[in-house]
């Protein structure tokens, strides 16, 4: 079996992410590139911070991290976990972005807030959010 790596990071948005066009641009790039590169994952945004989980072949994850690290739409990128994974947590999404709703907002906030101290829980929360209601790309 080929190797699978899962990486999670948090970062601070530097442009207003409540502008749908900004989210749409990120999702469009993800859709364009992630299927091609064997990457799947999820992206959450709350209180000015991103939490992103990406999973795929280690080389592809490394290249994506290099691209994303250089993106001026966010800063202070901090990797909270990076490990070899047995299986994908987001097999059906090139990049799922759980929709913000009154029901999902507390969990989304919690996932982003707790990512540094408990990344596993944050990934599990993100998966639950994705299953509830995600923008599929
Ligand atoms: C928070 C955040 C998450 C991103 N996630 C991805 C991603 O999963 N895949 C991707 O290809 N680009 C992602 N991007 C965009 C990349 O930084 C970069 O702009 C894009 O990959 C360039 O794609 P292009 O060469 O096809 O134009 C993300 C950007 C931000 C700010």
Image (cartoon, grey):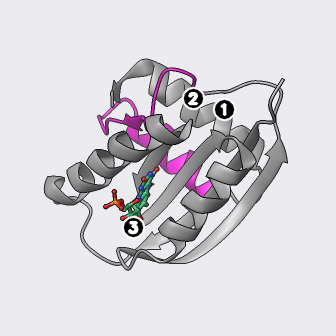
Question: Crowdedness of circle 1 by 10 Å Cα count: few (<14), some, many (20+)?
Answer: few
Q: In this figure, which residue is indicated by the disc labeled 1?
A: 124
* Magenta-colored stretch includes residue 29: no
The residue tagged 2 is: 127
Disc 2, ligand 1: is the CB inside 8 Å?
no
- The part of the image, by quadrant, that contains residue 16 is bottom left
Please tell me in which quadrant of the rendered image residue 15 appears: bottom left
Q: CA distance from mark 3 to mark 1?
A: 21 Å
Give the alpha-carbon distance from disc 1 to disc 2, as whole Å: 5 Å
Residue 48 circle label: 3
**The quarter of the displayed image where residue 72 is located:** bottom left
Residue 124 place in picture, x, y as percent: 66, 32
Q: Is residue 104 left or right of residue 9?
A: left
Residue at point 59% right, 57% down?
113
Quick check: can you spot residue 35? yes
Determine whether, in the image, residue 40 is placed left or right of residue 28: right
In magenta, the rendered stretch is: 90-114
| Disc 3 packing (10 Å; few <14; some 14–19; many ≥20) | some
Q: Where's residue 20, x and y in %?
A: 16, 52
**Does residue 85 appear left or right of residue 39 in this picture?**
right
SS category of the residue bearing label 1: helix
Front residue of 47/74: it is: 74
- Tell me if label 3 and label 2 are in contact, CB under 8 Å: no
Quadrant holding the N terminus: top right
């Amino acid at each position: 079996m080929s190797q699978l790596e899962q990486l999670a990071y948090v970062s601070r948005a530097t442009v207003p992410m409540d502008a749908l066009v900004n989210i749409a641009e990120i999702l469009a790039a993800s859709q364009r590139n992630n299927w091609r590169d064997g990457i799947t994952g999820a992206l959450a945004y709350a209180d000015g911070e991103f939490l992103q989980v990406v999973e795929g072949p280690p080389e592809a994850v490394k290249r994506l991290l290099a691209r994303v690290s250089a993106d001026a739409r966010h800063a202070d990128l901090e990797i909270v976990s990076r490990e070899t994974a047995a299986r994908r947590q987001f097999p059906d999404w090139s990049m799922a972005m759980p929709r913000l709703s009154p029901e999902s907002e507390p969990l989304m906030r919690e996932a982003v807030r707790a990512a540094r101290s408990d990344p596993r829980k944050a990934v599990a929360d993100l998966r639950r959010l994705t299953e509830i209601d995600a923008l599929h790309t």
